[in-house]
Image (spheres, helix red, strand yellow):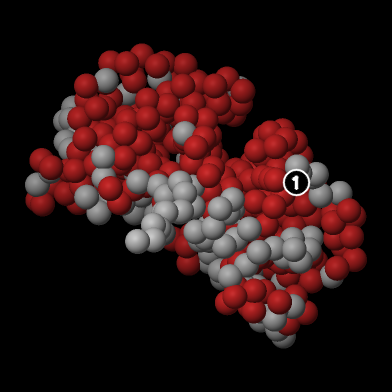
Amino acid sequence: MRRPSYTHNPSSPSELCLILGQADNWRHARRSLPKLSEGRLEQARNSRLGTEKNNDLMEFVGDRVVNLTCALMVAKDSFCPDQQKVVDRAVSSNDTLGRLAYQLHLHRKARLDDIDSEDVFGWGPQHYTSPPKALADLFEAYAGAVYEEHGWDATKEWLETLFTPLIEKATEDHLKQSVLPGYLTQAIYISHELLDNPVHQEKLHDYLEFKAKQFLTMAEPALSALPQSTKFVFGAKGDIGNDRDMVEIATHLVKFWVCEIFMSLYPENREALLKGPHLVSSITILVTNTWTLGCLGSLLKLESFFDVEDPDFSLFNKRLKSPRSESAETNNRKAAFRGKLTQAVYAMIGWYHSKDAAAAKKWGIKWLRPLVTRAHDILMEDPRFVRCLKRPEFHRN
């Protein structure tokens, strides 16, 4: 999946780059790769899109597993949210995962397109230039395959052995930095993204309003996990301040739960030649953007947890509208309000997870399942999202 790119300067390689460049550091990791059944291993190696048993959707699943595992690990030892963000993104970047895939020899028996094959086998870690993205894709596909075959606990344990030394080195690099990465100043916790056809979002909004009471009732366990003293404070750009660590974890949790729900409800997508990841990615956008999560936050009245000095606090008694009815005059103000409510939803989920991870996961999947199901049904009415499950048959005249 697409991630931040980290290109290293040959004259001053990072500590993270150095540890990944030495093959001896990874000899034990190569020998202890989790075993996979022959069929699943072959699929994890097949990066040729449009062919049967390709790893496209497996890679998407692996992306979610890798992101969540890395975020959970980094959060344990971070002393501030900025460190948490920087180290997390460094370790889970395409650059890092590509180097890791190379050292684990995941490319040696891979089925790659001609261009990817030329790029992969023409690259070497000794040059300190970023590896081809195809290598990172192979790592994610293998992680997805391990998750499918061995489950979450075993996959997390395996990834922890790989990521522990990388997190240590990435932390060293962060502490040496004199200039913080630019993305720390960006609003990265939320997405205002709408799909090309806003009708999809409008239909999901109508569903939320119809099921409002149900979602409110189901949210009670998570709401009760919020500390009584909670007050959400936001910066000038709308980013949450005091609960950023909770929001950071929850963004990964929600994406992982959406992926889990999708794979359990629609397992036939594992056989898709094309469009499987496009479908689940679009479902994720529908379910996790500010139009949806902001609406849920409004239903839960999470604005009541805003600081009274917040300029949007006065909007607490105004219902958020669907994309079809929002006027241009109020769009920017409401967008900021939706963004804050979305982060409040994530903070609520993060707090619940911090108190009881198992209960939070069980609740989260139950809470989000109706949304994922409805989003899937909406998108499947659009021919552009119909997956290609098998090759078209050509008949000779």
Residue 307 is situated, as x and y percent measured from the top left of the image, at 34, 34
Q: Secondary structure at mark 1?
A: helix
Residue 159 visible somewhere in the drawing: no
Is 107 placed above or below 8 here?
above
The residue positioned farthest toward the bottom in the image shown: 11
> Of residues 18 and 383, which is closer to you in this image?
383
Crowd tier of the residue under label 1, counting other residues whose Cα lies within 10 Å: few below 14, some 14–19, many 20 or above:
few
The extreme front residue here reads 397
Residue at image point 49% right, 41% down: 269
**Looking at this view, is 212 or 131 the one in front?**
131
Q: Is residue 44 visible in the rendered structure shown here? A: yes
Quadrant of residue 139 in the image? Answer: bottom right
Quadrant location of residue 286?
Answer: top left
Pointer 1 residue: 38
Identify whether 133 is placed above or below 302.
below
Q: Position of residue 364 (x, y in %)?
A: 48, 26
The one nearer the camera, 280 or 221, is: 280
Amino acid at circle 1: Glu
Residue 299, x across and y down, in percent: 28, 25
